Amino acid sequence: MIDVLHVRAFEDNYIWLIISDGGNATAVIDPGDAAPVQEALARLGLRLEAILCTHHHGDHVGGVAGLVTGKPVPVYGPAREGIHTVTHPVVEGGTVSLTGLGVTLRVLDIPGHTRGHVAYYGAGMLFCGDTLFSAGCGRLFEGTTAQMHHSLQRLADLPGDTRVYCGHEYTESNLRFALAVEPDNAATLGYRNSVIALRRRDRPTLPSTIALEKSVNPFLRCDSAGVRGAAEQFAHKPLPSGVDVFAALRRWKDGFNG
C-alpha cells in the first residue's frame, strides 16, 4: 500500500511525500522549501524519484532547484505557467507514471487560484495544491470566479472516498467561516470538534475526503438552499446561479475576520 507523509514548511505549508510500498522510491508534491524535504529523505532513507508541482507560487516550487541539483530527477508541472525548473510540462488529460512507486496519476486542469493550476489524481489520492482546502478554497489570484467554481465542481465529482491532500493547514480557520455560512450544519459542527482536538495536539487535519468536503465545505455546497440563502443575505440580492453564489461566498471569505 502506498504511504503518504507530510513535511511541514514555512508557517502552514504541507509538502507531501508519496512513498512506495515496501521500498524507498519517493515522489514529492509542491516542495516550497528544499531543506525539510532533504532532512526527511535522509532520515527515512528515501530515494527521490520525481517532483510534482501544482502551480507556480514560490511556497510550492521554491525548493525544487535545491532538490534536483546534480540529480536526474524529473519535475512535472503545469505547462501554462512557465515554471523554469519544470522538465516535464503537463496538461489536462495527461498522466504522470511513477514507475518506482507503481502509481499513475492523472492530470486535472483546475484554474482559478492561478491561471494554469493543475491537480494530480490517482490511486484514491488527490493532490490539489491551493484550489481545494478542507472546508475552504484558494483565493482567486489569476483566474475568474467561473473558472474556480468549475474547478471545484470537477473535484467534487471525484469518488467520495478520494483522499484530499492540499497545500496548507487552513482547516480550523476555514471552519469558522463555514459555520458563519451554515451555523446549524451538524456535519460541520462535528468536524470542527475533531479538528480542534487534532490541532491542540499539533496534528495535521489532512487528508480530508471528497465526501467530507461535500458535507462541510460551503464552496462545494453552492446549490444548497442554506448556503444560497446565506450568500444572498451577504450580497443583499438574489443569486440565480451557482457561480453567483460562489462569487458572493468568496468575497465574503476574503473579508472574513471570524
Image (spheres, helix red, strand yellow):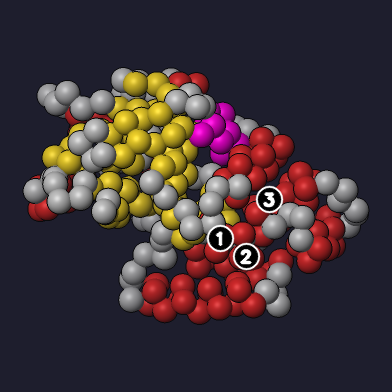
Give the side of residue 72 with respect to residue 167, left or right: left
Range shown magenta: 108-117
Magenta region, mostly helix, strand or loop? loop
Q: Which residue is mark 1?
A: 211
Q: Secondary structure at mark 3?
A: helix
**Residue at (55% x, 48% y) in the render:** 158
Query: In the image, which is nearer the foreground, mark 3 or mark 1?
Result: 1
Q: Residue under label 3, please give it.
A: 250
In front of the other: 171 or 222: 222
Q: Amino acid at mark 3?
A: Arg
- Of residues 4 and 113, which is closer to you in this image? 4
Distance CA(mark 2)–CA(mark 1): 7 Å
Residues packed near mark 2 inside 10 Å, few (<14), some (14 to 19) or many (20 plus)? some
Q: Name the mark on residue 215.
A: 2
Nearer the N terminus, badge 3 or badge 1? 1
Quarter occupied by residue 109: top right
**Residue 240 x, y percent position in the rendering:** 88, 48
Specify the label residue 110 is tagged with: none
- Dot 1, how many residues are within 10 Å of its Cα: few (below 14), some (14-19), or many (20+)? some
